[in-house]
């Protein structure tokens, strides 16, 4: 005889909390962009990007604008919101597929 209570309990263990996943992905996106902003602030972003491009056998002519606190704040907040939405949607789709 199959114990359906335990099956439901096991299935619920694989459900994701949409808010927690959204927060985790949002913070990851925001911190990654904050790290990029720190690289821009110290002038390390262009050499790093040039090196990464050279690893791909690429060379681009581009310029980096200077660090601006307001722009950086908007970037970090925006990427947090986008990451939260991506994480929330991922968890919601995951949960829907587990039912």
Image (cartoon, rainbow, N blue to C red):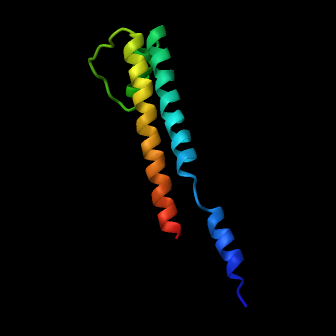
Instruction: Using the image, determine if residue 95 lies above or below residue 39.
Output: below
Give the residue at x 43% y 15%. 47
Instruction: Using the image, determine if residue 44 lies above or below residue 32.
Output: above
How many numbered marks are there? 0
Residue 88 position in % (x across, y down): 47, 48
Give the residue at x 48% y 34%. 29
Give the residue at x 45% y 18%. 37
Foreground residue among 88 and 46: 88
Name the image quarter holding the N terminus: bottom right
Q: Report which quarter residue 72 is drawn in.
A: top left
Residue 12 position in % (x across, y down): 63, 65
Residue 94 position in % (x across, y down): 50, 60
Question: What is the residue that sits farthest to the left in this orientation?
Answer: 61
Give the residue at x 57% y 55%. 16
Instruction: Using the image, determine if residue 51 lies above or below residue 2.
Output: above
Residue 9 position in % (x across, y down): 68, 70
Foreground residue among 30 and 35: 30
């Amino acid at each position: 005889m199959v114990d359906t209570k335990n099956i439901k309990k096991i299935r619920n263990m694989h459900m994701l909390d949409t808010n927690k996943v959204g927060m985790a992905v949002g913070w990851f996106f925001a911190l990654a962009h904050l790290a990029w902003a720190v690289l821009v602030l110290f002038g390390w972003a262009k050499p790093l990007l040039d090196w990464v491009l050279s690893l791909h056998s690429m060379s681009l002519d581009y310029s980096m604008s200077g660090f601006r606190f307001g722009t950086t704040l908007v970037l970090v907040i925006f990427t947090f919101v986008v990451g939260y939405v991506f994480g929330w949607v991922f968890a919601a789709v995951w949960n829907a597929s587990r039912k």
